[in-house]
Amino acid sequence: DAGVIQSPRHEVTEMGQEVTLRCKPISGHNSLFWYRQTMMRGLELLIYFNNNVPIDDSGMPEDRFSAKMPNASFSTLKIQPSEPRDSAVYFCASSPFLSGGTYEQYFGPGTRLTVT
Amino acid sequence: KNEVEQSPQNLTAQEGEFITINCSYSVGISALHWLQQHPGGGIVSLFMLSSGKKKHGRLIATINIQEKHSSLHITASHPRDSAVYICAVRSRERSQGNLIFGKGTKLSVKP
């Protein structure tokens, strides 16, 4: 299995630009998670989906952030407009099943975003 | 106060030493995860446990639900164990997928 795939691996953009991060979960996994990691705050959950439906987006910082999962094999996290404080590593993770139980999460390699 | 506290924040050990990393939490949980983040940034799930003890190779994870405490042990440590180890809990008060993360313990094992 290829694991969780994220693209791009690195993104450098100017303040005000739109940024789109992409994730392909492991085939057959029902749950998908978007995380952000910074030195100051560590790892934080932004949003997660179960069977393509957003379940908890309480971690999304503000309206500039949006996430979609149009099908079971693809998700995007969009920031529009981007700001320097959005600079972080964004991880996508997937899990085989969520409802009624807890399963291990498999992380992608992350996207390092730098907003200048 | 953070809901998940790890100690120590940084740990330096000599190759071969027995290592213990601690995690304490203040919320009711249904599961606890130990993650390993390599120097290159990749994150790997090591353990997920809700009671007792799990062992995988040289790694052992224990949890005491009553004391709200978990430990990760590494026996016969090796330089390749150098990484950041992150404790995360699934709180019963939050939605099922919402993990609460500790700040991590940075381990450096010297040859």
Image (cartoon, helix red, strand yellow):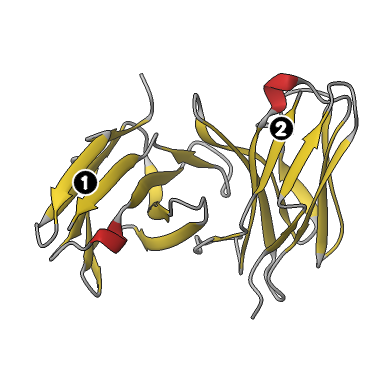
Residue marked by disc 1: B21
Q: Nearer the viewer, residue B48 or A1?
A: A1
Chain name for mark 2:
A
Q: How far across and how far down the image is residue B8, in percent?
A: 22, 35
Residue A37 in the figure: left or right of residue B16: right
What amino acid type is highlighted by mark number 1? Ile
Whether residue B105 is visible, yes or no, is yes
Residue at image x 67%, y 60%? Answer: A31
Total numbered labels placed on residues in the image:
2
Q: On screen, B56 above or below B52?
A: below
Q: Quadrant of the C terminus of chain A?
A: top right
Q: On screen, B57 above or below B105?
A: below
Q: Which mark is residue A114?
A: 2
Q: What crowding class fits label 2: few (fewer than 14 Cα within 10 Å), some (14-19), or many (20 or more)? A: some
What amino acid type is highlighted by mark number 2? Thr
Residue at image x 54%, y 38%? Answer: B94
Q: Please identify, in this view, whether the residue under mark 2 or under mark 1 is nearer the observer.
A: 2
Whether residue B64 is visible, yes or no, is no
Q: Secondary structure at mark 2?
A: strand
Residue A80 in the figure: left or right of residue B88: right
Q: State the residue lying farthest toward the left.
A: B17
Residue B67 position by quadrant: top left
Q: On screen, B39 above or below B76?
A: above
